[in-house]
Amino acid sequence: MHQPIGSTRHLANVLALLSILIMPTANAENLKVGVTLHPYFSFVSNIVGDRAEVIPLIGAESNPHGYVPQPADMKRILDMDVMVVNGIGHDSWAFEILQAAGAKDDLPLIYANDGVSLIPIAGDPSGAKVVNPHTFISTVAAIQQIYGIARQLAEYDPENADFYRKNSRAYALELRKSRAKFDGMITGVDLSGFRCATMHSGYDYIMQELGLNVSAVIEPRHGVEPTARQMADTIDRIKASNVNVLFAEKYFASALSDTIRDATGVQMYSISHISSGPYSDEKFADEMLENLTTLASAIRDVANIKATAP
Amino acid sequence: MTAKALQLVRAAGSRYEALVLGLIAIVLISAQLLYVANLGRQETEEQIYAWQISSFNSFEGADQAIYNSLFTVKDEVPYIYDDVNRFNGPDEKFRWPNIEDFQDYLVPPFYHDTSWEQSGSVDWLLFEPVAEGEMQGYSMYLGTNGQLDKQGSFLLTIGHVHAGFSNNNSLDIWWHPQRSIAMPESGFRDTLVREGWKLVVPYSGDKEVKRIFGE
């Protein structure tokens, strides 16, 4: 039926049309959010949906450990409105790029770990309490970061604040469901014989939240190979603690893990550091579920061996 | 060879060369020591009072995991509060999420799964605020009866806006060295400290960023 101009219904239609026209879309002046690490690409993509553009600072196949800045990085950083950084030890090169591009004082940064309660690295040979920067290999600390990033992004894009909060909650629930799946894989399994060591301290957050103790860490510092003496001490500690599982790095293979396995007889499994390969919305959730599935396999295998032992 | 040929000739500035070299060495060593003492420092140092406890330096294992989960709950509990009260009628009393609600949302450390068992199977209780008296204005979640050695009890207190807590709900996490303990008499700080509770202080990312980059 034709609506007369000026009628309430007509005005409502005009307002609805206007609201659609001014509603943020994927292409109209969207916030450009830079990220330094793969997990942050997934976090931010899931928070902003199609209402912001997510720009990785470095190439997908680059290894963030010891990364050397490239000229193309400076071009990318100048295109960002805000950048999400780890800031506590995994992306120090991002600050070199900021400096080199002359954007140090201009580009706002979101420190993903601002509201995260940190833990020390496990098994430090000196016994010192050294901050563990691998907060993104977890579900609890990851969710804490997701909420924090959503809250800070809302300050730069207040019109989408509710949208970002709603998405962050949905994403957090998705990650929690992965943990519930892990639980389903090990329900009723005897964990009393499970003793693990890890190649580096990157898995401390996920191990701790799952209630799994790490008896030994092979690398004295992330990316630093142990000396012959440290290696011998670690092998002794693994034997003395009855460690039966070693978790090695999926992306950054090391001959050290084979040496440890040969010397101690532990079973070896690979866990992802979620720091390499193509950037995608799903990468973090997919690889975290893969990691949890690997952990569950290791736990079940140890329980089976224990159950069948003479 | 004549005696003249063997004469020792000292460089004109030899006295100063040794002095300058020594000074340079001292400056270099001092700069290196300053660097190690400041930028290269890895250990975290923070002022912790007697009525506080550091989650980073004093906790390990299960208690650290429980605390970090509660730290995330601090962000989440207001969201769930909105959810559970969304369809309240005009006369219906608003309530804080109970332990069953947290089961639905799969929220640790309340959610009963294998990780909860591995972290000591802590019992969680919700204390809803009363209309009048000393307990007015506080909701509290008590975690107690953990099954692990050296495990303590936890208390998440929520001081409500209507009870005069600044302009937002105030959430604090407390820890008690006793594994089994009753719900405290009150959520007020003085009462909790008197009963042996310690306010947990996190070493959070913002503190580490300040340590690395300065203020």
Image: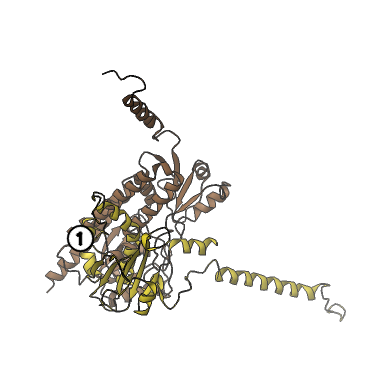
Q: Quadrant of residue A111?
A: bottom left
Q: Is residue A182 visible?
A: no
Q: Nearer the viewer, residue A93 or A262?
A: A93
Question: Residue B201: percent from the left, percent from the top?
Answer: 41, 69
Q: How many marks?
A: 1
What residue appears at the point 78 percent right and 74 percent down from the top-left corner?
B16
Picture quarter with the C terminus of chain A: bottom left
Question: Which quarter of the figure has residue A190?
Answer: bottom left
In the picture as drawn, the residue positioned furthest to the bottom comes out as B3
Left or right of residue B4: residue B180: left
Residue B49 as seen in the image, left or right of residue B59: right
According to the image, label 1 marks what residue?
B100
Under mark 1, the amino acid is: Glu
Q: Which chain is yellow?
A: B
Q: Give the camera-side residue of B21 and B120.
A: B120
Letter of the chain in brown: A
The reply to whether residue B110 is in sight is yes
Q: Is residue B128 above or below residue A288?
A: below
